[in-house]
Amino acid sequence: MTAEAELLRLETAVTAIAANLVELDDNPARKELDRVALTGRTATLWADATQALTELWDGYRLLTESIDRARELRDLRRPSDDERARFRHEVLGASIRLSTRTVPLAQRGLLGAGQIHTTCTPAELLSAMEAAFATAVGVATRAGEAWDRLLPAAGEAASALETVRRLGGGTADLAEADRRLGLLTAALATDPLGVEERDLAAVRTLIERADAERTSAGELRETLTQRLAAAHRLLAELNAAAEEARAAAEKAADRFPAHEIAPVPGGDLRPELLSIDALAAAGHWPLISPRLADWNRQARRRLDGLRGGAAHNAGLLANRNELRGRFDAYQAKALRRGLSEHGALTPLAAAAREALYVAPCDLAAARRAVNAYQDALTATIARDTR
């Protein structure tokens, strides 16, 4: 690979690195990991990830400085042979100094150096940064997923436990469930990667067993009748949310690339609820509670997925319309300034218009095109004013 081609690759990479580092900095899970006094497995993994993040930012600085030096050499009007060689070394050679270590006098030979420098090529630094980024992102992502998955589930378990207690449950199973849930909730706050799904499943089992022991046949029938009615109301919400999600997906279809459109979650939970209704009609109340609890968990997850997908797809249209509005406003500004036919602005305006009005619309490309037109117009007006 030539030095010119490698420099282009590094410039492209450093732009992507900057965007990804900013996005990682804004990640809610990453912020929470920095805020909380972590313990256990999460503390160990996040300490490694924090070190990786420090190395990432240091690497980004070193790589940016190396690219700047290479650009200065490349852009010389009449570079000498020595300057050309320095350019090739800056891009392809071990031009980046990672660290400097002083050698104690007692350990040096008469002709030995007083310092040892650790260097690498920009490509080697980029490879190391990719590994560090994967480490940091992996921990933040897994911790965020654990919180998103287990905190609501623990909340549901706490609510179920309180319901059983309020209705008069006081068995040993309920006390043990309360103890385990307290430990699990405390651990989840500071060590999300150390909490196991089976721990929460064991708590649910204890609560369900305590509920079964506590509840008489009449109370069970009354409670489950109310829960079944609530489940049917939830099913109606699911149907409405599915219609909304389908409508949002249809509006976004063909207007945006297929991979950017959130799919509508499939599956039909109605047959299982009808099966539970049949158990109730036959009087098999003890069999209903675990199946209904599982159905409700699935329904809540499905409802969250449908609403999230609808919001995402509606957001695609909203973002595109916002960009169109911005573009129209800046075109109007150009018209007022007599710049609508400006030689430098016209192709930028055409590119922005095509990005915004030709389907499928790549929002990222459209935003770059609008920003390019906006920046060029602002610069042109500033020059004209001067």
Image: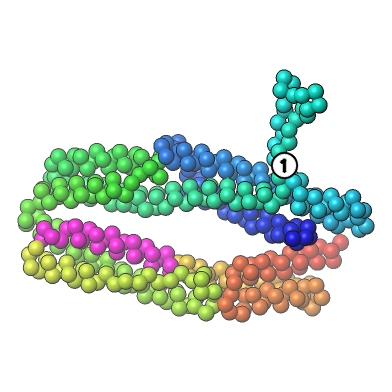
- Asked if one can make out residue 160 in the rendered structure from this viewpoint, the answer is yes
The N terminus: image quadrant: bottom right
* Residue 366, horizontal then vertical, whole percent: 63, 70
The C terminus: image quadrant: bottom right
Above or below for 204 versus 249: above
Q: Residue at x 82, y 75 (%)?
A: 343
Q: Residue at x 77, y 60 (%)?
A: 2
Viewer-closest of 47 and 372: 47
Q: Is residue 127 left or right of residue 110?
A: left
- Asked if one can make out residue 15 in the rendered structure from this viewpoint, the answer is no
Color scheme of the displayed model: rainbow
Viewer-closest of 292 and 124: 124
Viewer-closest of 368 and 48: 48
- Chief SS of the magenta region: helix
Amino acid type, residue under disc 1 in the picture: Thr
| Residue that carries the numbered disc 1 in the rendered image | 119
Q: Is residue 151 left or right of residue 337?
A: left
Q: Quadrant of residue 357?
A: bottom right
Above or below for 327 versus 13: below
Can residue 345 be found in the magenta stretch?
A: no
* Residue 271, horizontal then vertical, whole percent: 22, 72
Can residue 295 be found in the magenta stretch?
A: yes
Q: Residue at x 47, y 41 (%)?
A: 45
Q: Is residue 37 left or right of residue 371?
A: left
Q: Is residue 361 left or right of residue 351?
A: left
Q: Residue at x 37, y 53 (%)?
A: 149
Question: SS for tag 1?
Answer: strand
Few, some or many C-alpha atoms within 10 Å of disc 1 (few <14, some 14-19, many ≥20)? some
Magenta range: 285-310
Q: Quadrant of residue 269?
A: bottom left
